[in-house]
Image (cartoon, helix red, strand yellow):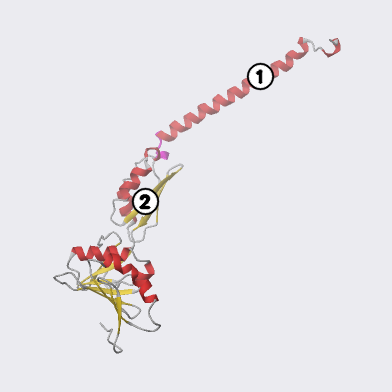
Amino acid sequence: MDKDKVIPLEDRLPQLKRERKQKANRRFAFYASLFFLLVLIVVYVQSPLSKINRIIVEGEQITARSDIVRASGLTANTHIWDIRSRKIADRVEQLRTIRSADVHTYFPNTVRIHVTEYGRKAYLSKGDRYYPILQNGAVLDDLPIGKLPTDAPILIHFTDKSALKAVSAGLSALPTQAVRNISDIHYQKSSDMEDNLLLYMNDGNRIIASTKTFSKNIKFYPKIIAGLPEGKKGTIHLSVGSYFVPYQQSGSNNK
């Protein structure tokens, strides 16, 4: 072996000492950082900083924000680390206006609740008041005095709860635009429950239907009118089969 390439031990000692010192410093820095991190976590968990400071509610239109927060069970004393998102979402979904809810937490103390509501499919007329009806059949409190329904049909003379449920189910199966084409629906009590619904459409047609088959047959209305002669208006029967009877004279479609 070439003696010129052998490095004496006394020459290597300073380098070995520096390497050992660097390793020791890195180890100390790691454990010190870990220690301070644990201290910060403990301080955060035990301090008011971990309590909810902000609740963001998104997606609500017909449901009061205060009702959603109340249903969630969240308060200013709730710790962020104590939140179970699915459990809170289940509570919010107990509200009759809420179809689904998603809950997310954000460091250090923010909670976001995003809700999807049941859509308004009709308004129940009682005297001079109008009560919104949702997709799930829930009837809400009446509209403020002077406010009229504009985005869904009006249900008139509905004294039978089963009829109201059948019509709500049928409207829920229709596209939003098709529902908005219905002006109002009149319930006409019949002993055999046939032809007990009269619908006035915004396009000038009428529909005669039955609560027995309404939810199944009303979805065919868009296809039926698409096949009618241009400019032809009349009455469409949807109780059992489906057929069209044109108006005999102008104005015969008046309510």
For marks 2 and 1, the one nearer the N-term is 1
Tag 1: amino acid:
Lys
Q: Which mark is residue 101?
A: 2
The image shows residue 248 at horizontal and vertical percentages of 29, 88
Callout 1: 10 Å neighbours few (<14), some, many (20+)? few
Secondary structure beneath dot 2 equals strand
Farthest front residue in view: 241
Main SS, magenta residues: helix
Task: Please name the residue shown 37% across and 58% down the image.
Answer: 60
- Residue extending farthest to the left is 191
- Where is residue 43 drawn, in percent x and y? 44, 32
Is residue 145 magenta-colored? no
Q: Which residues are magenta?
A: 46-50
| Labels 2 & 1 near each other (Cβ < 8 A) | no
5 left or right of 189 in image: right
Relative to residue 206, is residue 67 depicted above or below? above
Residue hosting label 1: 21
Left or right: where 60 falls relative to 96: right
Up-down: is 110 above or below 248? above
